[in-house]
Image (tube, rainbow, N blue to C red):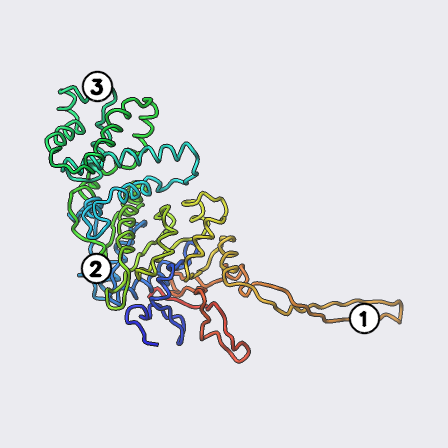
Amino acid sequence: MATNPVLDRPMLQLSDTDFLRFRDLIEGGALITGGLGSGKSSTSAKSLAMSFLEAGMGGLVLTVKSDETEHFIEYARQTGREKDVIIFNAESGLSFDPLYYVWNVPGRSAAHIETIVELFTTLMSVGKVYSASSQERYFENAVQELIRAALVLLSNAGDPISILSIHQVITSLPTENGQLDNPDWIASSYSGKLVLKLRERRHTFTESQKSDLDIAMTFLFEKWPEEDPRTRSNVESTWSGMASKFTYDPFRSMFCSGRVDFSPEETTHGRRVVLADVPVLEYGRDASRLCQVLLKIVFQQAWLRHSFKPGCCHGAFLFQDEFALLMHRNENHFHMVCRGSAIAPVCIVQNILSIAAEEFGEQTPGSKTLGFLGLISVKIFHANNETQTNQYAADQIGKHWADIAGWSGSTGGAGTHQHTQAGVSGNKQYVHKYEPERFTQLLKPDSENPLSAAVVYASGRIFNATKTDRNPEGKNYISCVFSRE
């Protein structure tokens, strides 16, 4: 069978005869876990990052910690890839307007209102646990209807479509019936000025456009003012809680300029590495998460629109340290189908409890967390003192029947007739191949030792180095040592 120069690239060496190839990493991605100081970021994750760069691949790097940008720039320098790195931050002068990109993207999804509605629905859920309660669903639907109608107004009026312009529409809508007939209100209201433009252009509209406008105008200028003021305020604040962060600099300049200075296609076809230098620990948890998840969602959507075929592109990677802070509600879907687009997501996290709590609202890893983790084919487990993560790792590797020896002894009789009896017994028990407590004992790096031990599991894989005369079938996991040097 012929090898594929992209999919069969060796990315991470595990032994003299075992490698993780790119095709392993695109099957749902790679999960790297480890407690504080375990070396997950500085050894195995670093090795993966260096391998992506050495292979000439492009990708998107998200940042939580303040030193991540510096580290990745150094990786690029060591691999001769400095010129391929696009540093996207407030000082770069670069802009990526996600709505301009989505609205003008080539293909059938261009200028598709529902794509933008879904984008914002996902973005508004970041950092929140979706409960699917009737009240939460009501407000979500109400905001969707607002966004949808605002987009109809903007697109037909010929105004730029951005987070800022949608926000201006929503926050300038009438609050009383009859305001649309008031010249003073129209002159002072952004949405009113759009209505004037629509009236001037109405003779150019198709019947379909006129129908869409009638629905949007009825909702925005008749139904919206009639809403209970408390309901209206709650719906608007649901939108504004997310959108208002983009109405001020630096995020306004970075995300609402009407420019796209780089694109997702440059990562897959141009080998560019986009480094989102908006670390959570510097810009604040909510604002930084929104910016980076917004970028991530648009890149994920763009990547999935492209089906990988041999020779079409180079594939790409998505690198996410402190992954739990960078998740969104459609994460499952991306990991489920990223293989078809040759995208390798790398998810680095201390333990699985943080994933359970941040995204799924589970106090302990339940069906939602385990279902998501089940989509990820490669798992690298470093030293950890979090018991549920260690239990999960041991369960992932699995159990087998093992011979368990037992010993017994007794003393009987009296006086000179005392005697001792001893016996040995054995039975089979179904036990973990790799016991959970062993993960607490894995080697960690320190000031003198640059090495970190880890246990690697890959779905459907038997590792060659684990095959011995006593165990010719081999094992589905392998113990490795990674170095930070």
Q: Amino acid at mark 3?
A: Gly
Residue holding disc 2: 272
Place of residue 461 in the rendered image (x, y in percent of width and height, measured from the top left):
45, 69
Report the disc number at residue 56. Answer: none
**CA–CA distance in space, label 1 to label 3:** 104 Å
Q: Quadrant of the C terminus?
A: bottom left
Look at the numbered disc 2 and give the secondary structure of its residue: loop
Give whichever of 340, 156 is nearer the camera: 156
Residue holding disc 3: 178
* Above or below, comparing residue 405 to residue 128 in the picture: below
Place of residue 189 in the rendered image (x, y in percent of width and height, measured from the top left):
17, 26
Q: Amino acid at mark 2?
A: Arg
**CA–CA distance in space, label 2 to label 3:** 53 Å
Place of residue 366 in the rendered image (x, y in percent of width and height, measured from the top left):
50, 48
Mark 1, Cα crowd under 10 Å, few <14 / some 14-19 / many 20+, is few
Disc nearest the viewer among 2 and 3: 3
Residue at position x 32%, y 49% in the image: 64
Disc nearest the viewer among 2 and 1: 2
Residue at position x 13%, y 24% in the image: 187
For the residues bearing labels 2 and 1, Cβ distance under 8 angstroms: no
Q: Is residue 455 left or right of residue 402?
A: left
Q: Is residue 426 left or right of residue 435?
A: right
Q: Quadrant of residue 71?
A: bottom left
Report the disc number at residue 420. Answer: 1
Give whichever of 40, 292 is nearer the camera: 292
Q: Quadrant of the N terminus?
A: bottom left
Residue at position x 25%, y 42% in the image: 113
Q: Amino acid at mark 1?
A: Thr
Q: Upstream in the sequence, badge 1 or badge 3?
A: 3
Q: Quadrant of residue 203?
A: top left
Task: Residue lying at the far bottom in this picture: please name it.
Answer: 469
